[in-house]
């Protein structure tokens, strides 16, 4: 049904500094997942998915193990999620998700990215209502009806299922993530998920052009340079 989405998978960086940033972002997310749901990936599907994604992005095992050990010990940093919303060049809408151990610092850093690129940070809820907060699961397959039956039998509130190029894409509300994943694994056995994550998907898109494109790219680059920023979602269409 044309529900386009961006996989947040980051391409492997060419420099050691950039690689370190990718490792740090995964390390934080793995730590938070393990703290919230337990250190056993078999019993914590969010952690399991995050570890699998990290491995696909070539994050070293020692980085993954260190994050889990920190969560196991109960000490170390106390990262908490922080979300900022606002408007970018041309009126496009932006959501910035962070994990931070210092909210004041993170807010100041993110706000600076907005102000230096003529963007406007707004109050929480200002733009997120124009996005769908969905779990997205992509895997090889073509039997859309069988997958739908398995999900409905497990009482999963499915938003949409797409079939294209020998792959199935399941969309469900983010609150249904664990239930949907368990239902698929129970019905189909082990699955190599190409995408296994929760994202904000824009309900519509805002076209930007000319100088706004360059300004928006600068804005995204500045956000990407911040260690606390985990993901950036937007409705901009170049």
Image (cartoon, rainbow, N blue to C red):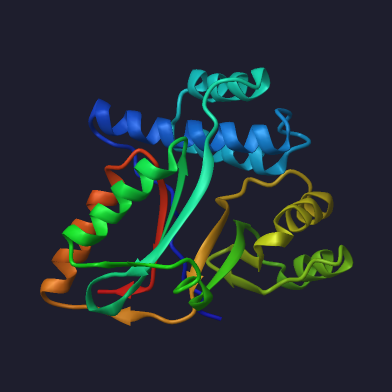
Tell which of 238 and 29 is nearer to you: 29
Residue 120 in the image: x percent, y percent? 28, 68
> Which of the 4 quarters of the picture holds residue 20?
top left
Tell which of 184 and 93 is nearer to you: 93
- Determine the residue positioned at 78% across, 56% down: 179
Residue 206 in the image: x percent, y percent? 33, 80
Q: Residue furthest front?
A: 104
Say left or right for 44 vs 63: right
Say left or right for 211 vs 217: left
> Which of the 4 quarters of the picture holds residue 142?
bottom right
Tell which of 82 and 2 is nearer to you: 82
Quadrant that contains the C terminus: bottom left
Quadrant that contains the N terminus: bottom right
Q: Is residue 39 above or below residue 235?
A: above
* Numbered label tally: 0
Say left or right for 42 vs 95: right
Say left or right for 56 vs 163: left
Residue 192 in the image: x percent, y percent? 63, 45
- Determine the residue positioned at 67% across, 21% down: 72
């Amino acid at each position: 049904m044309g529900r386009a989405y961006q996989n947040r998978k980051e391409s492997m960086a060419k420099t050691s500094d950039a690689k370190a940033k990718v490792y740090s972002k995964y390390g934080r997310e793995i730590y938070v997942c393990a703290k919230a749901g337990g250190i056993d990936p078999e019993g914590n599907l969010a952690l399991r998915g995050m570890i699998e994604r990290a491995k696909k992005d070539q994050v070293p095992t020692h980085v993954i193990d260190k994050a889990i050990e920190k969560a196991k010990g109960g000490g170390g940093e106390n990262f908490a999620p922080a979300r900022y919303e606002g408007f970018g060049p041309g009126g496009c809408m932006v959501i910035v998700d962070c994990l931070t151990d210092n909210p004041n610092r993170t807010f100041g850093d993110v706000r600076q990215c907005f102000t230096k690129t003529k963007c406007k940070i707004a109050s929480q809820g200002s733009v997120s209502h124009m996005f769908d907060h969905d779990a997205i699961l992509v895997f090889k397959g073509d039997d859309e009806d069988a997958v739908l039956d398995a999900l409905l039998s497990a009482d999963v509130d499915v938003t949409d299922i797409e079939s294209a190029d020998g792959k199935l894409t399941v969309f469900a509300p983010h609150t249904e993530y664990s239930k949907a994943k368990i239902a698929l694994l129970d019905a189909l056995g082990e699955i190599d998920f190409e995408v296994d994550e929760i994202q904000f998907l824009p309900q519509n898109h805002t076209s930007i052009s000319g100088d706004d494109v360059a300004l928006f790219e600068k804005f995204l680059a500045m956000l990407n340079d911040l260690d606390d920023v985990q993901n950036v979602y937007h409705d901009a269409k170049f």
